[in-house]
Image (cartoon, helix red, strand yellow):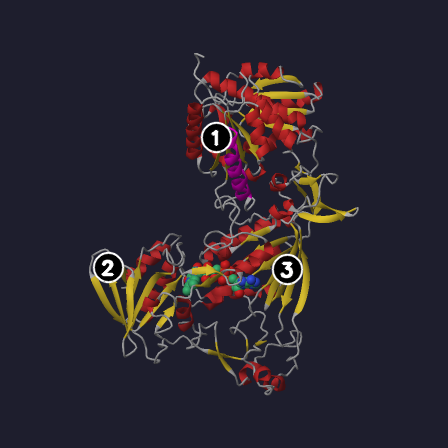
Amino acid sequence: MNIGVYVCHCGTNIAGVIDVEKVTEYATTLDGVVVARNYKYMCSDPGKDLIRSDIKENNLDRVVVAACSPTMHEKTYRDVMEEMGGNPFLFEMANIREQDSWVHTDKDMATEKAYDLVRMAVAKVRRNEPLERIEIPVTQRALIIGGGVAGMEASLDLAEQGYEVIMVEKEQSIGGHMSQLTKTFPTLDCPMCILAPKMALHEHKNITIYSFSEIEEVSGYVGNFEVSIRKKAKSVIEDLCNGCGLCQEKCPTKVLSVYDGKLGTRKAIYTLFPQAVPRIPVLDRENCLMFTKGTCGVCKKVCPTDAIDYDQQDEIITEKVGAIIVATGYAEYDPTPIEEYGYGRYKNVLTGLQFERLTNASGPTLGVLKRPSDGATPKRFAFIQCVGSRDVNTQEYCSKVCCMYTVKNARLLRDEHPESEVYIFYTDVRSAGKGYEEFYKISQEKGVKFIRGRVSEVVGLPDDNLLLRTEDTLTGDVYEVEVDMAILACALLPAEGSDKLRDILKISEGTDGFFMEAHPKLRPVDTLTDGIYLAGCAQGPRDIADTVVHAKGAASGASVLISHTKMSLDPISAYSDESVCRGCGECKLVCQFGAIEIEPLNGRLIAKVNEVLCKGCGACVGACCNGAMSIRHFKDEQINSMIEAAMEVA
Amino acid sequence: MTDEFEPNILAFCCNWCSYAGADLAGVSRFQYPPNIRIIRVMCSGRVEPAFILEALKDGADGVLITGCHIGDCHYIDGNRNAEVRINNTIDALKYLGLDGRLRLEWVSASEGARFAEVVSEFTEEIRKLGPNPLKET
Ligand SMILES: Cc1cc2nc3c(=O)[nH]c(=O)nc-3n(C[C@H](O)[C@H](O)[C@H](O)COP(=O)(O)OP(=O)(O)OC[C@H]3O[C@@H](n4cnc5c(N)ncnc54)[C@H](O)[C@@H]3O)c2cc1C
């Protein structure tokens, strides 16, 4: 065993406090050390050359570098080892900068501590074992869950790079919430017009869409997922349907349309909206007379291509993919529990999304402003902000998009109906974003009245008008305002079914319930499960521009993975000693990654670790009752050797 | 003994939160007493009571275990395992006359100042407690 020890000065960062000469001299006295040197900057090329030439000249097989934190340069030196034909895991770092010279001023004590840290690292490296990275194949395809603007953007980016993309959308059409909007801030574009070119992705040769479908099960691991998808029965044969729309025109059954915020109706066989992709209707079996009464059959009679199939069954499809992007978006908070706002009691109290449908040219009123209670044209509007957001009783977080969409709708009202009176009752106006503050300023100039304060009560009047009571917290005045319609800016919540999906994918959620990213700043699109990424509002409320950015990030993360045919995994994984293991399963209980299975071996049970799934945390080792479980690179004897070395008096 | 007692403290820090927190203390130049030696483990859940006993047997005057805050564990809930196991060990040490020599703390990667504080505080406590009675003199 030939160990080389290298002590870095890091300019004066280390050498200014620690006597590097003494540390180097001390290192030569340690068991197994054949050479010790120090240099101004070990991570520089001449520094690395010292190691390179010693590996050759002195036949070093193990190396310790005493320098900065391993999070800085462990990889740098491991690469040197590998490049010189050595094993990168026969290497250790002693952290004498972040955890010594930078936190202590007493030079003698800091130098003594450096002795100890070097001794500990040498003790460890002596017991390190050569490890081989695990190589696994990668399926060069991706699954996108959710077909909102996030899912679409990510799919297109990947498909354009040449990867096959499978998109699973639970609704019958892709488009997500953006397809429901009337105009979009800050440009006041027509959302359908800017979305339609992206929705044409169903024609892309690399993209397969499963609409009206849900994820049933996911097995496997990074690079190698197997997904089963439930394709629910539409009662329409997709290959035959030409999307003519005759069935929905003739269907006699009307049902309240959830897509239109229940402000209008749809038929029992229907597409969500005229530009739906795919343009295949779905028969709603809960309301169709054929299913409820056993008679009707109008759609089947009028269908020119004989595409209606009342007996169609759900189908289960399996797909293999290397990466998964979760783009399931959000759900709008149902404000019924906040009783003082009267939602559900007063017909003229609407949510933000309902108002979008009410003003939408393809919405229930074809864009003509009418109050739901009596069809009268409303003239006075109150927008109430932070409904279910920034409130300890509901959601504590800010839903981020409501200030801007309210400002948008208020401004549109003033533009299109200059006689209208528009109030916004707000907590703070949050308009950070390119062009957003300017957009807000314009709405003020156009006569939108901003009142800072939480509305305490909405009272329904006999003529269906609404009386709002509030205090202006800036002036202290108590207000009563009568309006014709109130619009609640409701919180954005995680999409329905997120809990189920989280369990299927084994990813985590944050305290806000949205899917959790691996790191809030540096890894905002990764999850802690390798190979699974997040895009758009699935990770937290954000507007369309931010959603697109996030989705492009997720696509980039996924393509870094699936652009390879093989990948290597860190070999720091657990393994069980089959001769000792009793198969009690305690290890399996604590493993959060499903990496351990209890299997029979010669008539008894033993624990078996799937090293591909193992993340190397070592929880199983701690849980093992008889020392059968070990973890590579952090074995008991390796850690114990460091403990002993630490306590040896220098 | 004329010299003031300088405690030997051994710490186990998880790789993702608290080791990074210790690094951040360095980057921010938050000073703390030089009595501590840190061993990096991937997760606080990896720390076995046997390591703690080994350290105390070898003469450590105090042992500090640090991990991610509950809910932030890189491995979902390794720190919860650590919490149960280390708290049991803290209790057991009372019966061995080693009360107060083991401590469990949560330090995130952004809490460099907190890391320095925890170490300073613990070092002072151990200083007051005096040398590990198991240590051969
Ligand atoms: C009232 C209102 C007005 C707004 N106005 C604007 C505006 O003017 N400008 C702006 O920039 N932003 C606006 N926004 C925000 C905008 O809606 C979002 O930024 C955008 O829709 C986010 O896109 P997404 O793809 O992440 O989520 P979504 O649009 O929610 O799409 C998610 C998709 O995933 C599908 N899905 C969900 N769960 C599953 C599952 N388990 N399996 C399969 N599929 C699933 C859904 O059916 C949906 O198609 C507004 C929001 C609201 C509430």
Coordinates of residue A332 in the picture (x, y in percent): 44, 64
Residue A613's place in the image compared with A11, above or below, is: below
Highlighted range, magenta = B78-96
For the residues carrying marks 2 and 3, which lies nearer the camera in this image? 3
Horizontal side of B129 relative to A416 (left or right) equals right
CB of mark 1 near ligand 1 (< 8 Å): no
* Observer-nearest of A16 and A632: A632
Q: Residue B99 carries which label?
A: 1
Name the element at disc 3.
Answer: strand
Name the element at disc 1.
Answer: loop
Label 3: how many Cα within 10 Å (few below 14, some 14–19, many 20+) = some
Earlier sequence position, callout 2 versus callout 3 = 3
**Which residue is painted at 42% across and 26% down in the image?**
B124
Mark 3–mark 1 CB contact (< 8 Å): no
Coordinates of residue A551 in the picture (x, y in percent): 53, 54
Label 1: how many Cα within 10 Å (few below 14, some 14–19, many 20+) = some
Residue at mark 2: A472
User: Label 3 amino acid?
Assistant: Glu
Residue at mark 3: A217
User: Label 1 amino acid?
Assistant: Asp
Helix, strand or loop: magenta stretch: helix
Q: Residue A426 carries which label?
A: none
Q: Alpha carbon of mark 2 to alpha carbon of mark 3: how far?
A: 52 Å
Q: Alpha carbon of mark 3 to alpha carbon of mark 1: how far?
A: 50 Å
Label 2: how many Cα within 10 Å (few below 14, some 14–19, many 20+) = some
User: Label 2 amino acid?
Assistant: Asp
Residue A462 found in image quarter: bottom left
Residue A148 visible? The answer is: no
